[in-house]
Image (spheres, coloured by chain):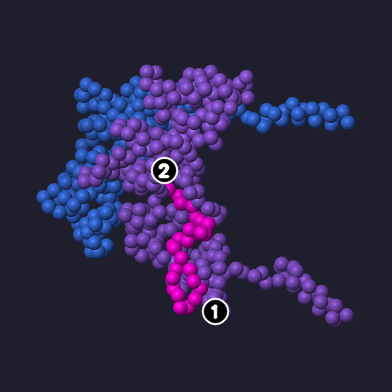
Chain colours: A purple, B blue
Amino acid sequence: MTRIKTLIVLFLICVHPCLSVAAIDYSKFSHATPKHRAACNTCHKITFPDIKDYPSHDACVSCHRPQFFRGAKPPICSVCHSKTSPRDDARLAFRNPAIKLQFAIEFPHDKHQDVIAMLQFSHAAPQNYYNCTVCHGQRTATFKAVPTEHASCFNCHWKSQQPVADNCNGCHKPATPYTPADAPTRISAKFVHEGGGIADKKHVRECATCHINITKSASSRGLKPDVPITACTECHNKVGLRQDLNNELAALKKNRTYTCNYCHAPSVGNLDPPASHFAIAEFPSFKRKDIK
Amino acid sequence: MKLFLFAFLLMVAVLPQSQEPPAKQTCVLRLNARVKWDGAEKLRALQRKRFFLIPGTLEQNRALIDAIERQTLTSRDCYYQKLGASPALINWLKEGDCESVYCRGVEKDLVTGPKAVPEFASAYAASQKEYGNEETALRWLTTNVPPDMRDGFYRDRQRVIQELLKQASSVQSVMTDRNGTAYFTDLGPGTYVLSNLIPSELGQKLVTWNCQVTIRPEDLATEKPYSLSKCVGVEKPMPVCAAD
């Protein structure tokens, strides 16, 4: 009888998750773990002019001493180190691009527009994009880059101007782990910022001329780099100049399988045109399914 | 059984419509902020000015409009004079129509030499000591400008704006570009008040605009232009700075 009881207890310990000790994977670090939710500077020491590396060993050892000295290759080391060996201190890139982001950045474009909209340097090359290039550098012909270094912020927010360097939470808000998109979703995938004619470069304008929602955005949550069709049709659908939108709508009206390709990639060009396109082109609205 | 059949038919009838709800159409209001001032003949663009669009008519927003018109704000010059700023800093801010030191790049000639602005020179010296190299000291210079001198005027105005906005809801605000253009988006039909809430300094005058704009159902899915020159601004003389 005692043997059966022992077997039952052992069985329960093995299968019942509440009774068994769950195996913790120490190779994975999460800021969501309750004990990892202390003040940021408990572990991250801010050093001028940027935060370029993982916290020091002290930050982990204070609680994880047993895991540090477990076996020849302690899994916990692989959170920061590319090789888990006491003879090799090489670290992974900070932050590790292979790991999902655990924080979202809160950035009020409106406040920054208020104070730096006129920021110009007389010695610099013509600042065609005005203040936006302070943070958004060129990445490809079509996309602008987003700032990735703290130094982009610290030149104003290092101290005294909140959120300052040690107020991480001022910008970094805990989020469900996510993989950031490589590039923003493009609606007009064929647009080139440096385009608008080789010589004229008519697309080179103030950013807010087309990205009309930027100056009103108090948060970067849900912010899209949306551009209204009117920003395009000012030149691309004007009597006596160009009729690009009208031509596309006319081609579609004749052929329901037509892909609008002057501006769009097929993923967008095969959809029904939105109401804004018909309104601006003064073209009677229709849907693909209704085309005979 | 009949009830079941009726319910099923009702579902079939309703389902296709609920699957494809009509797209919500909104209007874009294109603000053209170009006005005449200082006796100029031509309209001039109001660059980098923030405007607000408040739901409701002027009458419905009477309390807010009264509060806007009652406010007594100090001018940029008076604020900085009271703070003991150097004439060089006051002029530098004025030249760029700046509300804070962030709005223009501070270059080497402003921290040393005959054109130096004393506040920038001392911040630069402190930054050199703190950051260890000239380039960073110049780029990070504003971190060593005293807070009130750095952006106190801007913060004061923001406090006033936030206080005024407590009397309204669903307010959009946008900033004009160098041509004086700005866009209010996602607007439904209705009446709105276009306002700058706090007066703009135009030459020797302070000007406040509070005007009614109506978005009609036929304006949806379009871009409706609105010229600020149609709106009569309330002009007040620039306040005289109080002597210390």
Q: Chain of mark 2?
A: A
Residue assigned mark 1: A72
Q: Residue at x 52, y 69 (%)?
A: A78
Q: Quadrant of the C terminus of chain A?
A: top right
The dot on residue A143 is 2
- Three-letter code, disc 2: Phe
- Residue shown at 40%/34% (left/top)? A210
- Give me the C-alpha separation between circle 2 and circle 1: 46 Å
Q: Quadrant of the N terminus of chain A?
A: bottom right
Whether residue B212 is visible to the viewer of this picture, yes or no, is: no
- Give the amino acid at mark 1: Ala
Residue at 32%, 43% in the rendered image: A131
For the record, the magenta segment spans A82-110
Residue placed most toward the observer, B126 or B138: B138
Q: Is residue A48 above or below residue A270?
A: below
**Point 66% across, 69% down: residue:** A22
Magenta-span inclusion, residue A139: no
Label drawn at residue B90:
none
Residue B196 position in % (x across, y down): 36, 32
- Near mark 1 (Cα within 10 A), the count class, few <14, some 14-19 or many ≥20, is few
Question: Nearest the camera: A213 or B153?
Answer: A213
Mark 2 Cα shell of 10 Å, populated few (<14), some (14-19), many (≥20): some
| Side of B100 relative to A281 (left or right) | left
Q: Chain of mark 1?
A: A
